[in-house]
Amino acid sequence: MSGLETLLDSRRVWRAQEIATDSGPTTLATGHAALDAALPGHGWPRDAVSELLSGGAGSGELGLLWPLLSRLGGEAGPVVLIAPPGVPYPAAWRRAGVALAQCYWLDVGGREALWATEQSLRAGCCAAVVAWLPQADARALRRLQIASASGETPGFVHRPLGRASEASPAALRLRLHPGAELEVLKCRGGRPPSGRIRYGRPAGESMTSDPVTSRRRDNPRGAPTQAGIARAAPRER
Amino acid sequence: MRWVCLLLPRLALEGALRERRDPASPFALTEGRAPRQIVRAANAAARALGVKPGQALGVAESLCLGAERGGEGVEKGLASDAVDPETTNRWRRHLADWAYGYSSQVSLHYPHALVFEVESSLNLFGPWPRLEARLRAELEALGFTHRLVIAPNPAAAWALVNAHDALAVDSPGLEAALGALPLGRAGLDAHSLKTLKRSGFRRLGELFALPRSALSRRFGGALLRHLGELRGEWPLALESYCPAHGFSRGFEFDTPVQATAGLAFPLKRLLQTLAVFLRGQDAGVTRFRLALTLEDRSTQHVEVGLLAVQRDPETLLELTRGHLERVRLDGPVSALTLTAAELTPYAPVRRELLDGPAQQSQAWAALRQRLVARLGEASLKSLVEHREHRPEAAVLGGAGPEGVATPERRARPGWLLPAPTRCDSEIAELLAGPERIESGWWDGNDVRRDYYLVAWHDGRRAWVWSDPAGAGWYLHGWFG
């Protein structure tokens, strides 16, 4: 017992439960009821880095973050995207409810992306900082974690699935599965819930119910059935 | 009228020291031609080793070398430089720029001194003791030894500063203060002084006691006029200093600088000088230029553009460093010149009055400035919705004359790839589509594509298109 206390005193081990009870409302609701219920803080950590591991763009990362980004909506400051995997499509972001006037993205890479992320987190004026940093290692993440805590700015770092096995100082680690499902790998303040959490509709689902689909009949080329094209696609090579 | 006279007894030395990287090591200013240079002034470290004005340079150098051998922690021998009247004048003008922040009437009429009128400034800066403390603190920070006297007219202030420091004289007390002044300190010309001394006069007061007609008859009208100016009875018109419209200062290196990191010290000095100049003019800058003179006499220019008007030297230094980090030097740099051709009126922001959102927007402005300074203006982008059917034009702009008036209502992917890439085997299933996009015939970039939402082989959601007329599939975006 005394051995355990020595270990705790030396601060090399932290008590998972302690932080959740000590700290007040240091989280931001994710906007997904199922996810909020599963996380020990009932939301995204407010002054820490959350790490999102995925197979790349299109894994549902925007569906996951958009509710938060749209709720912060300009009042809490600008949202800064750093080194995103593509050009943000303004129409899609507006449809998701994000205030475009308060949304900026930085077209940089490598070391500069890490620097910009740290600066933005530390400045303490951004509503949220979302970065794509496949190059970041545990040391870099620790720096970002400190910057996020000192700037009291929530940070979201996207990294590839290959990094899942590495240790990470992020306060929350999520693994995204296509089809709007995720797994909690690590969360500060509690034991990670087991199993996959379904947090919303799969991305782009609304397109199915779009008027465009019904207009298919007017397609002069004579639209094949969806399944038909799916089978035809590989053959067209 | 209340005139301040600022005497700078060690301006030449202190100006030269300010341009040195190690102002604490022994340094002397010399005059005369080699090899017969004479020490004109020396800094504290050199004086401590026995260097005195009037010594031959050789003697002074050997004194410092001796100390070095004695191991008193002196790193180098005596560094020396010839007195350069132009450098001294430049620093005098620099201080005039500084004084211009306190008065619109600044004059460089008297040697080694500045006179400026402050009566109208007292309303703003408080009573004289407070203003005096402020002036002294700023001069201290700039690194100049000084003496300050305030008197009702510039001639009296100049005469009194020769004998006093921290003297404040008002009109009723002027005659008594001047009267006690020895004749040698009263700024009289050499001929009158000699005649007066021979006649047995020692102090100004003795002259004031004589009838004017007698003075004029015996010593000439010029003396009477000088006495009149001192007492403020005779108007004195001094040419006013007129600050330059732009700023340009240089810095030469003893040894060429190889890396941008070596430019930090001179840059800091130049920016501090710039900041003093800007404060005097109540102005700021939005852009300035660094000219780096390379060893081969060619010049490399670095333009520093700012998003907002700035004049704080710390901020300017940080932003300039950000700019320089992206610059690759074309060669070793032998001199650096900072030029700010355009000044912009500066409106200071009262930080303490701001709260919440205003403070935050200020912090964002500062962050933005920092990001742009290092990463370049083009890399920070905002999300602007262009009303266009073609995805490239909708995201990147360049809408034609017939850009749609209504915002896009159909599902669009969160990410658009800058250029479509060919993909065939990666598509697992078509989930929705097609959506025909046919537009842009007016600008020659017309497209005719059928877009589909597809499931990628690993389950991700992609936006792909195929040409209705041709074969092949192209990946164009991701539904994040």
Image (cartoon, grey):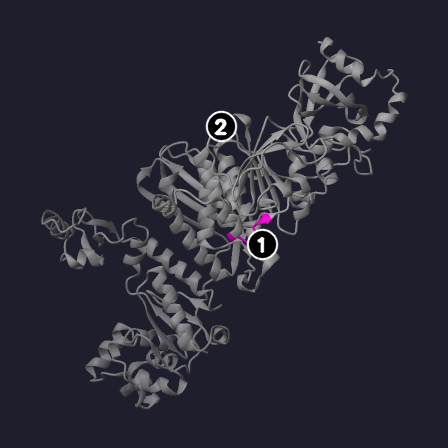
Viewer-proximal residue among B356 and B240? B356
Are marks 1 and 2 in one subunit?
no
Measured as percent of width and height from the top left, residue B395 is found at 70, 33
Name which quarter of the figure residue B199 lies in: bottom left
Q: Chain under label 1?
A: B
Measured as percent of width and height from the top left, residue B2 is found at 43, 77
Asked if residue B152 is among those painted magenta in the image, a careful observer would answer: no
Question: Which residue occupies the extreme front position in the image?
Answer: A1
Looking at the picture, does residue A52 appear above or below residue B278?
above
Q: Secondary structure at mark 2?
A: helix
Who's the residue at 53% across and 41% down the image?
A: A49
Amino acid bearing label 2: Ser
Looking at the picture, does residue B203 appear above or below residue A10?
below
Magenta part, dominant SS:
loop
Viewer-proximal residue among A105 and B444? A105
The dot on residue A165 is 2
Tell me which segment is drawn in magenta. Answer: A22-27
Who's the residue at 59% across and 58% down the image?
A: B356
Looking at the picture, does residue B477 appear above or below residue B198?
above
Who's the residue at 61% across and 45% down the image?
A: A43
